[in-house]
Image (cartoon, grey):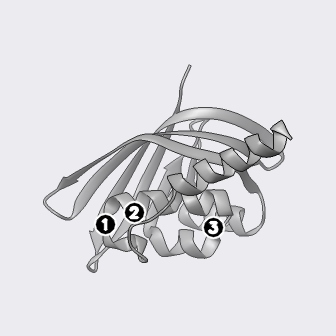
Amino acid sequence: MKKIVFFASLLLISVASFAQTTGDPTQNPTDCANAFFKSMLDEDAALMGKILADDFSIVSFDGASVDRDLILQALSGGYVATETGTTSATRTRTYNDNAAVVTCNWKAKGSIQGNAFDTEVAVGVVCVKLGGVWKISNVQFTPFK
């Protein structure tokens, strides 16, 4: 019974962490960044494709760089599986209404190509306004020691 309550609590925390104030995550940089983590948790390549800029890149836990096409393939192909993920300490700074930096901590558990991870990382998300909507151009994961 304790395991069921713990699992239900964890699920509710994850869902609350990714709740969006608008239906379209491209309307502000904070929602755009939250949609990134939601798409990782849900393995939702369609949502991820909507929020990523064409020249997107991500620097992963181990320092490897991954481009937009590769992350979309990894999500849709099941190579990245996030079991749990919660964000905390989110802060958004906007510059000239066309660029923003969203920082947060992300505690996540899952696997990448069958290699398990259970980690907390500091995350920097660079968002840019393109064609009147917010897109993510870069994500940087930095593991805590």
Q: Is residue 128 left or right of residue 51?
A: left
Measure how far apart labels 1 and 3 are at the Cα level. 22 Å
Are dots 3 and 2 in contact, CB under 8 Å?
A: no
The residue carrying pointer 2 sits among few (fewer than 14), some (14 to 19) or many (20 or more) residues within 10 Å by Cα, namely many
Query: Mark 1 is on which residue type?
Result: Asn
Q: Residue at x 28, y 80 (%)?
A: 131
Are dots 1 and 2 in contact, CB under 8 Å?
A: yes
Q: For mark 2, give the secondary structure.
A: helix
Q: Is residue 106 left or right of residue 27?
A: right
Q: Point out the image quarter for the C terminus.
A: top right
Query: Mark 2 is on which residue type?
Result: Asp
Query: Mark 3 is on which residue type?
Result: Leu
Q: Is residue 14 above or below residue 22?
A: above
Residue 10 in percent (x, y) is at: 67, 45
Q: Residue at x 24, y 59 (%)?
A: 99
Residue 30 in percent (x, y) is at: 36, 58
Disc 1: which residue:
28
Residue 22 lies in quadrant:
bottom left
Give residue 72's mark: 3
Q: Earlier in the sequence, mark 1 or mark 3?
A: 1
Q: Point out the image quarter for the N terminus.
A: top right
Q: Is residue 44 above or below residue 126?
A: below
Disc 2: which residue:
31
Measure how far apart labels 1 and 2 are at the Cα level. 6 Å
Q: Earlier in the sequence, mark 3 or mark 2?
A: 2
- Given residues 127 and 2, the one toward you in this image is 2
Q: Residue at x 58, y 43 (%)?
A: 60
- Given residues 9 and 24, the one toward you in this image is 9
